[in-house]
Structures are given as C-alpha cells and as structure tokens.
Image: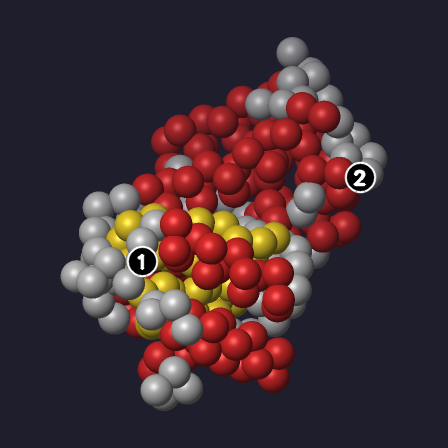
Amino acid sequence: MSIHDGHRERLRTSFVENGLDSFNELNSLELLLFYAIPRRDTNEIAHRLLDTFGSLSNVLSAEREELMQVEGVGESAANLISLVPQIMRKSYVSRTANMKYINSSADAGKYFLPRFLYKNEEILFIVCIDSSKRIISCIEISRGCVNAVETNVRRIVETALKFRATSVIMAHNHPNGIAMPSREDDISTQLVRDTLRTVGITLADHIIVAGESYTSYADSGFLR
C-alpha cells in the first residue's frame, strides 16, 4: 500500500463515518475524483481544478471541455464532475413533479429555480397553463440566444397555441448576473405580452433567475 492508498482510505473512512461536513472543498473534490482516477494522487488534480476555477461551485459549473483542459483531468473525471450537478438538478426538479398549479409568483419561483441550477448559458422556458391555472407543460424555447426576440416570440405563441394554453409564464436566467430585468428584458416581455394578447392568451408572469434568487414581472406591476 502506498502513501496515497493510506490517504484515500482515511478520507473514505471519514466520509463514511461523518459525511462531508468536516471536509473542506479541496478534500471533497479529492474524494470525488477517487472514483474516476483510481491509481493517481488526486490531491494535486483537485488543487489544479480549484486554482483554475476558483471554487468547488465553479468546478461543478464548468463545461466538460473546460475541465479536460486541466492537467490530470481525463474523460472519466470530467464526466463524473459534470454528472454531479446534473443529478442534483434532476433531483431538485423532481421535487416539483407534484406541482399541479401555479397560483402565484412564489409558486413560479419554486417551479423554475431548480431548472436553472448550474446552467452556464441563458435558457428560456415557458409553462403553458389552463384556465384553472393548472400546469399543462413546461417547454424549453431557446438556449444561448434568449435575446433573439422575434424568433422566441414566434415559438412562444406557436407553443401556447399548440397546447391550448389560456396563459403562459416565461422564465429565463442571468447566469453570471443578478436577478434584475434589463432594458432588453423589458422590451421582450412587452412584445411577448402584446403578441399573446392578439391570440387571446395572457402572459401571466416572466420570472428572471440568477443563482438562488428570482424576480417576477407580475409582482412589479409591469404586466398590468
């Protein structure tokens, strides 16, 4: 048994007995890498990842291709690291599976927040809702081009009509910003609201998400 084997066993034992609460970010990442890199010192690789991306959260948010540019991170390690946030997101989204209705901005925030967890690019979703405020469907409208206003408006209207929605809630994220509407957000929201009105559908809300925060256009009075 090498010195690295002894260190691995100590970390594994500590995790089994006490969980991750006593681990710092370096040791947590090091432990994760054990399961993708069985025969190398993962401490140095974990150091490089944290030095490159700045924090454990940023490591987990990094693209697979970015991870593989770090010395010592191969395909298996990059896949494992990328898998963690995606499983977390699926877990949190599954908690909303029993939500049948959206009756308020708080409901909308609860519904949308997990869908943007660890997302590095802008994504635009809509939820189609019936006259009882029951959720009909949640559809991704665009990815990486949320400001392609005319294209998105057309897709939103087509989707709402397809699902025979009475109202629609939009949501998009500001990956590296704050959950405050921009001037462009105001313009696109007004255009979607007015275009939906021409086909008898209401824009009930537009939620903007940044991290664990969100803002609601409905709460601001903008949609009145």
State the CA–CA distance, disc 2 to disc 1. Answer: 47 Å
Q: Please identify the residue farthest to the top as the structure is shown.
A: 1
Q: Nearer the viewer, mark 2 or mark 1?
A: 1
Which residue is at the front of the view, 117 or 202? 202
Which amino acid is tagged 1?
Ala
Q: Secondary structure at mark 2?
A: loop
Toward which corner of the image does residue 218 lie, by quadrant? bottom left
Q: Which residue is painted at 69% across and 44% down in the image?
A: 63
| Residue 207 visible in image | yes
Residue 165, numbered label = 1
Label 2 belongs to which residue? 70
| Residue 4 visible in image | no
Residue 22, numbered label = none
Above or below, 43 against 35 in this view is below
Residue 189 point in image, percent of width and height: 50, 76
Toward which corner of the image does residue 45 lie, by quadrant? top right
Above or below, 9 against 56 in this view is above
**Residue 188 falls left or right of residue 128:** right
* Badge 2 or badge 1: first in the primary sequence: 2
